[in-house]
Image (cartoon, grey):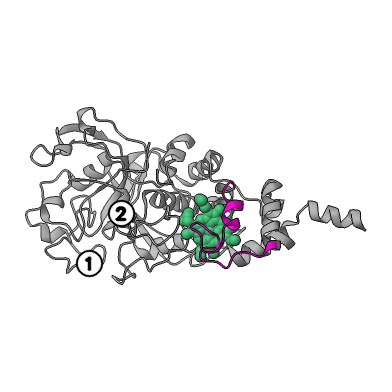
Amino acid sequence: MIVLSLLAFLAIDFSTQVKPVLDQQCAACHDRAFYLRKKDKLVASIGLPATAKGAMPPGGPQLNAKDRATLTTWVGEGMVFPEATKALADDLGLAKILRAQIVKGSKERSAAQMKPYKAIIPGTDVPYEMVPIPAGKYLMGDDTHSKDEAPQHPVSVEAFWMAPREVTWNEYRLFMFASLAGEDPGANITIDAVSRPTKPYVEMSFGMGIEGFPAISMTHHAANKYAQWLSAKTGHFYRLPTEAEWEYACKANAPEPAELGEVAVFKANSKGQYNLVGTKKPNAFGLFDMLGNVMEWTTDQYYADAYQDPKAWYPSKTSYPHTARGGSWSDVAERVRCAARFPSDASWKLQDPNLPKSIWYHTDALGLGFRLIRPLKIPTAEEMHAYWNNGVAEDQ
Ligand code: HEC
């Protein structure tokens, strides 16, 4: 009898002991990929008094002693999820599995086969579109404005598809809330494995509108993870554009617009908030709102002197700064130009009510959004992993 209960105490049972605690106390905000990533922090976070900074659940009440002991034992035993619900980690291994799906799911092998397409995000009724952007050469930068845009220099860009519109809340909220996307935990282990945002504490549209409006205030990490999530759902490879690709798509081998107000939502015509996506004239590639409405994340780390020795891609080394492009509804015309560069900054989450500050939301960047591209050439799993994980999710 004694031996039996001792055994029962030593080997924790996931489904009857651990899962109920996670489901009731943590699942509203976290998923399995998160627990695995935060393995080393979990025991400390539930041990803190309810009012302490970083205490989980945030703001209390603290878990009772039995539940704390259950989770602590489970972590001590290696944080094992039973076979049936075994989680994949969001690592290079996942990128390899996703790449195999992507190679199978992507039929186009040459530029001639690239067509515009409209697709529904699987499991939902939310559509998104992509249009082909031909390979080409152009002059990147501008010698007549800010120093970080000079010198102007020739750049070659390979073919890709780009979303004609900024990612809307209709799309982005499916990623924020798995239940809205009709996802059952455990039903698709690769989708489950992609890290997802924690629930925000504030209403993220700040009253500016949701239906058809651009998603805003996501961190660089969050935009990358959205790209990975959409890739896992659709079997196509999506990522943020590089600065070089973004500027090429914005300039579109065409002269600058004579009347900025015809193509862009900016300070002079925005009425003090973002507008619906796609209400102005598209550019020569058929892209809406490249200028204005919301500025858009690129994948690149920002270097003010990048054009002294230009590279095709500047992978992340630190959390800040990354480059956003295009200017927003709150910017004056001078900043709403294809060549203008916007370095991100830690102050973009100054007012974040989360403790510790969330890795998902830039609560002070109400003019910041993104759109995705899909390169024709499918990259290696290592490259995919590097695009989707800037490796610097936490503030440094
Ligand atoms: C109401 C939402 C909410 C609930 C419920 C919640 N958390 Fe959290 N948790 C957060 C937020 C917000 C953060 C901040 C970091 C982030 O966004 O990634 C966080 C961070 C963490 C971290 C990382 C701490 C660090 O130092 O990096 C761990 C571990 C964690 N939570 C575990 C738990 C566990 C275990 C539970 C259940 C007992 C739980 N959380 C319940 C919202 C929540």
Residue at image x 21%, y 33%? 305
Residue 256 visible from this viewpoint: yes
Residue 339: give x, y in percent of width and height: 17, 43
Question: Would the CB of label 2 be found within 8 Å of ligand 1?
Answer: no
Spatial CA span between label 2 and label 1: 17 Å
In the image, residue 120 lies in the stretch drawn in magenta? no
Q: Magenta-highlighted stretch: main secondary structure?
A: loop
Checking the image for residue 273, the label placed there is: 1
Asked which quadrant contains residue 176, the reply is bottom left
Position of residue 16 relative to residue 254, above or below, is: below
Residue ID for mark 2: 348
Q: Which label's residue is closer to the chain start, 2 or 1?
A: 1
Q: Nearer the viewer, residue 362 or 42?
A: 42
Residue 30 visible from this viewpoint: no
Horizontal side, residue 58 vs residue 323: left or right: right
Q: Nearer the viewer, residue 127 or 21?
A: 21
Residue at image x 54%, y 43%? 94
The span shown in magenta is: 40-65
Horizontal side, residue 116 vs residue 235: left or right: left
* Labels 2 and 1 touching (C-beta < 8 A): no
In the image, residue 44 lies in the stretch drawn in magenta? yes
Checking the image for residue 229, the label placed there is: none
Kind of element beneath mark 2: helix
Horizontal side, residue 218 vs residue 246: left or right: right
Q: Please name the amino acid that badge 2 sits on.
A: Trp
